[in-house]
Image (spheres, rainbow, N blue to C red):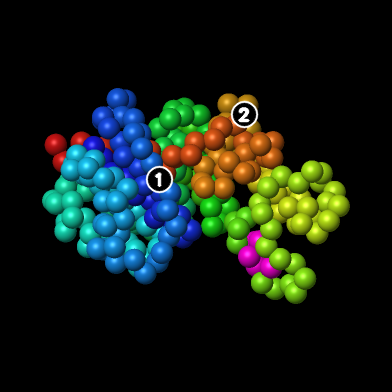
Amino acid sequence: MLLTVDVGNTNIHIGVFAGFGDHASLVRDWRIHTQPHLTADELALTLRGLLGDDIERVTAVAALSTVPSLLREIRAMLPRYFGAGPHVLLEPGVRTGLPLLVDNPKEVGTDRVANAMAAAATHPGRPCIVVAFGTATVVDAVSAAGEFLGGAIAPGVNLAVEALSEHTVTVRKVELRRPRSVIGKNTVEALQSGILFGFAGQVDALVDRITAQVPGFDTPDVAVIATGYLAPLMFDECDTLTEHVPHLSLDGLRRVYERSRQARR
């Protein structure tokens, strides 16, 4: 089995795949809170606790981390706890087969690369817009030819809530849920409306601009894919999203691993 680990700034998404290529399937997955000061030993202990006896069936690991301190610990953990592999640690310089048509390809976050890889592979010949709802809200464009074209990055929903409560005296953190109406009748509902519907409008506006301004995206065939841990909250509020793929980055990691394995043959 292949263990995939996507370390984000807020969550760590972990998944186990069985099979290879078209026969691969996600068997189990978990989300845990990111702790940036975890050591390699602590991370391995966490994975062992989640996997249980299934950890003995793991033959390889594919991982990425947008947290530099944990990237170092993952690099130390892999040979110590999972043997020689073959393992894949997705970082700048790793060949994925995905053309990065941006000014500096090494600046593109590896989570964005994994998402784009999976989107292009599952929607061949179709332009894709990937909307990742995480610590940041990231809207990326992938051409019909499978090229990463770039994107837009905005503060995420939770980040905006925390900033608002931190910098205002009378505003407190609220539960992120749909209010009764767009017109809030109390402070909590007013905040929920502004946050939820405001961010939905932001996403729809960015998607509309991409489809209007980027060549090849002005077509009804464009796939607008929502992913990230906040996607379930936002999906029904955005008019432009066409599908929700919660395990997009894990699928991208699987595809990077499989490409690397085939290249070694």
Q: Amino acid at mark 2?
A: Thr
Q: Mark 2: which secondary structure? A: loop
Res 107 → quadrant? bottom left
Residue located at (40% from left, 66% from top): 36
**Of the residues tagged 1 and 2, which is closer to the observer?**
1
Would you say the magenta stretch is mainly helix, strand or loop?
Answer: helix
Q: Amino acid at mark 1?
A: Trp
Q: Which mark is residue 203?
A: none
Q: Nearer the viewer, residue 194 or 144?
A: 194
First in sequence: mark 1 vs mark 2: 1
Residue located at (71% from left, 66% from top): 172
Q: Mark 1: which secondary structure? A: strand
Residue 246 on image: x %, y %? 48, 39
Q: Quadrant of the C terminus?
A: top left
Q: Nearer the viewer, residue 188 or 139?
A: 188
Q: Which residues are magenta?
A: 160-165
Q: Are there few (<14), some (14-19), or many (20+) residues within 10 Å of tag 1?
A: some
Rounded to the nearest whole Å, what is the CA distance between mark 1 and mark 2? 36 Å
The relative height of residue 29 versus residue 37 in the rendered view (above or below) is: above
Q: Which mark is residue 219?
A: 2
The relative height of residue 89 versus residue 253 in the rendered view (above or below) is: below
The answer to if 161 sits in the magenta stretch is: yes
Residue located at (62% from left, 29% from top): 219
Residue at label 1?
30
Q: Is residue 223 visible?
A: yes
| Left or right of 120 in this view: 204 | right
The relative height of residue 200 versus residue 65 in the rendered view (above or below) is: above
Residue 29 on image: x %, y %? 38, 41
Q: Nearer the viewer, residue 188 or 83?
A: 188
Q: Quadrant of the N terminus?
A: top left
